[in-house]
Each structure stands twice: as C-alpha cells, then as structure tokens.
Image: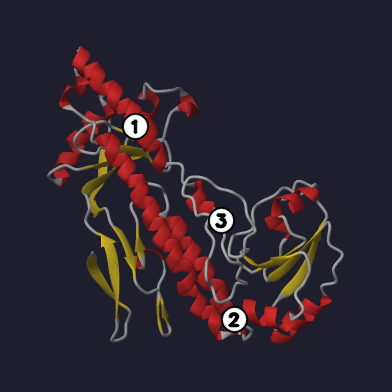
C-alpha cells in the first residue's frame, strides 16, 4: 500500500510504498553507571549488550556507547511511564538518570524513484527499515558509496551519462531486498513475542510450560534478526547498464553469504600471503585483477580506459587462494570494488568494454 510521499524539489513526486506506522515505541536514554556490574547473566565481557524482555510491551534494553549509558524501547502509554518501565526491566534497585524520551515508528517503506533529473536521494529518504536486522545504516552507506564515485567520475569528466542512470537501477533493488530482509527479521521477532502469556512469570507448571514454548520459538525466530550476513555482504547489482551482463546468477540470500565474482557482486575478501587483505592493495580507480594462471596482455584495455580519461591499473595477484575463490583469470573491478566484468581472456572489443563500464 502507498502510505506517504516525498517531494524531490520539482513538480513531480516520489511515492513511498510498503507498510508504515507498524508499531509505535518510546525510546528513552539513561545514565546508569552501576547497572552493567549488577546484571546476573554472564560475567565481565561475557555480558550482553542487548536484552529482550518477554512482556506485553515489546521491551528491549540496549547498552550503548559504554557500560554507563542505556536505551530502553517499549510500547508504554505515555513518555513519563518510561522511568517505571526501566525499573521493571532491570529488576534491581539502581541509581539512574533518564536523559531523553522520544517516540519512534516502525516502517517498511521504499521510494519508487531515487532520482529526478539533477536531484538524487539516498539513505532514509528512499528506504525506511526496522532496525531489526541492522540494515538501515548499511543500506544508506551503500547508497552513498555508489553515488559518490559516480558523481566524482562525472565531475572529473570521464564518467558517461549512464553512470547516473545506473544509480537508481543498482541501489533501488538493494533497498527493495533489504526492506524485505528487515520484514523477515521483524516478523521473526513478533512471532516469539506473540508467545508471551502473563502466567510466564509464575512458578507453576503452567508458567514453566509457557516459558519453554517461548524459548523454543525464540531460539528459531530471534536468530533471523542477527543473521543477516547474506543481505549485508552478498548483494549484487542486476541489470545495471554499466556492468557486463551474464544471464542467470546466484540466488540472493538474507542469512547466508556465498562468495562470488558474478558481475555486479562486491569482490569477496581473501587474505594474501603477506597477511594483507586484497581490498587493501587495490587502487581507487578501475582495477583489472590478473590472477596467477593468466598470462594475458592487458595493455589494450589500459589504452582504451586511458582514452576516456578513466583511472585504471592492472594488479597481478599470484596467490592460488585468490584464483580458487574468484574462479576466473581476469576480473575488472569498479572504484567501489564491485565486479564489472570477468573472464579467462579479454574480449575482442576492448573499447566497447571500456565504454560500457564507464557509462558511455
């Protein structure tokens, strides 16, 4: 359903679609320097940072920047009730100061456009996710990285017009998938919370049975909120006008990361022999990785890129582990480390490849 609109500054409008105002919670910030040492679960650094309270108020306690500051989220009737809710949640007498109280809403929304002419949108302006799953900032940073190098390329004169066209194509699909991943995670949390019963606190057979049921459901469903490595690392751009197309491609998984160099994917990490991460030895422009089994000459691609003014270098990596994981002799990387092309030999028309990946 459509639940809101965001104006882009022109006469046209960008519409948000999805679910809005799913749940309203109050968030309060507390200064409580003694609480960490009083937590009876675990010892020292083994204590947790996040504590989900099984109750009817969706209570969630988080240790913030140090062991002295905490936030509490709960569905209470009024902000002044957050003090008593904090005391109920921690369960022990403790000194504290409530520094802030505010209300926030859970939304799962995606804008239908990320661009209108010279106006580009990123971050929460185009996708709103529930913090469950931890994808909001990751997605916004990804938007910024994708857009920033394309803006730089255009300002420096070597980026073609399709670079800007590719921004919405690439990032909106990630926003769409991550809104879906956040929905998947939040539904998991709601499932185990729905098992709460008032008798769960009773020292009775009925209370124990209710606790056992909730624990079993939570053991399955709560994991969905923390196991998002596939959404975080495994996304790839499909159908981009500046990436060499290969039909098909691996499935997009929320909870599992499978390293791949399929065009559009971000280059997987490997450690090289000198204990350097391969990402740390790659330059800031386009990079052609020449892996150990390739003796192909690459000067022709360098000349084609140089003719467009695009930054380019060839990096030879002889480590067998890189070739085994990446699966190809040659991999062309964009400045954002996403794979633009791969193969075991360069294509015949290197000018066409150079023009494709630079947006011409």
Spatial CA distance of label 3 from label 2 is 25 Å
Above or below for 325 versus 198? below
x and y percentages locating residue 274 in the rendered image: 79, 47
In this image, 209 relative to 334: left or right? left
Seen as rendered, the residue at the extreme left is: 77
First in residue order: circle 3 vs circle 1: 1
x and y percentages locating residue 298 in the rendered image: 82, 73
Q: Of the residues tagged 3 and 1, which is closer to the observer?
A: 3
Q: Which mark is residue 218?
A: 1
Quarter of the image with the C terminus in it: bottom right
Q: Looking at this view, is 96 or 300 the one in front?
A: 300
Quarter of the image with the N terminus in it: bottom left
Give the total number of marks visible in the rendering. Answer: 3
x and y percentages locating residue 114 in the rendered image: 40, 74
First in residue order: circle 3 vs circle 2: 3
Residue of label 2: 359
Image point 70% across, 76% down: which residue? 311
Image point 37% across, 37% down: which residue? 222
Above or below for 309 versus 279? below
Look at the numbered disc 2 and give the secondary structure of its residue: loop
Quadrant location of residue 75? top left
Answer whether residue 332 is visible to the viewer in this image.
no
Look at the numbered disc 1 and give the secondary structure of its residue: helix
Residue of label 3: 250
């Amino acid at each position: 359903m459509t639940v809101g609109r965001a104006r882009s500054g022109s006469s046209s409008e960008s519409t948000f679609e999805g679910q809005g105002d799913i749940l309203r919670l109050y968030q309060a910030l507390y200064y409580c320097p003694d609480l960490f040492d009083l937590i009876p679960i675990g010892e020292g650094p083994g204590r947790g940072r996040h504590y989900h309270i099984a109750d009817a108020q969706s209570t969630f306690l988080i240790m913030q920047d140090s062991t002295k500051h905490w936030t509490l989220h709960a569905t209470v009737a009024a902000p002044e009730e957050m003090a008593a809710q904090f005391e109920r949640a921690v369960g022990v007498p403790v000194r504290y100061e409530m520094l802030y109280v505010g209300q926030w809403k859970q939304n799962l929304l995606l804008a239908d456009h990320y661009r209108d002419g010279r106006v580009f949108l990123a971050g929460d302006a185009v996708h709103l996710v529930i913090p469950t799953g931890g994808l909001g900032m990751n997605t916004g940073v990804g938007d910024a990285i994708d857009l920033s190098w394309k803006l730089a390329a255009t300002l420096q004169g070597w980026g073609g017009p399709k670079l800007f066209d590719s921004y919405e194509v690439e990032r909106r699909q990630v926003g769409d998938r991550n809104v879906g991943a956040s929905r998947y995670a939040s539904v998991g949390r709601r499932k185990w919370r729905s098992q709460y019963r008032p008798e769960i606190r009773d020292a009775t057979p009925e209370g124990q049975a209710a606790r056992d049921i909730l624990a079993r459901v939570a053991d399955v469903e709560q994991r969905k909120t923390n196991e998002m490595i596939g959404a975080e690392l495994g996304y790839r751009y499909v159908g981009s006008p500046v990436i060499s197309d290969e039909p098909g491609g691996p499935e997009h998984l929320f909870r599992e990361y499978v390293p791949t160099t399929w065009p559009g994917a971000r280059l997987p990490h490997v450690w090289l022999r000198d204990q350097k991460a391969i990402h740390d030895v790659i330059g800031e422009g386009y990079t052609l990785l020449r892996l150990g089994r390739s003796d192909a000459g690459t000067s022709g691609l360098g000349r084609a890129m140089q003719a467009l003014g695009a930054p380019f270098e060839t990096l030879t990596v002889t480590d067998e582990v890189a070739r085994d994981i990446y699966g190809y002799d040659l991999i062309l990387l964009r400045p954002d480390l996403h794979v633009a092309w791969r193969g075991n030999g360069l294509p015949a028309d290197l000018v066409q490849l150079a023009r494709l990946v630079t947006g011409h």
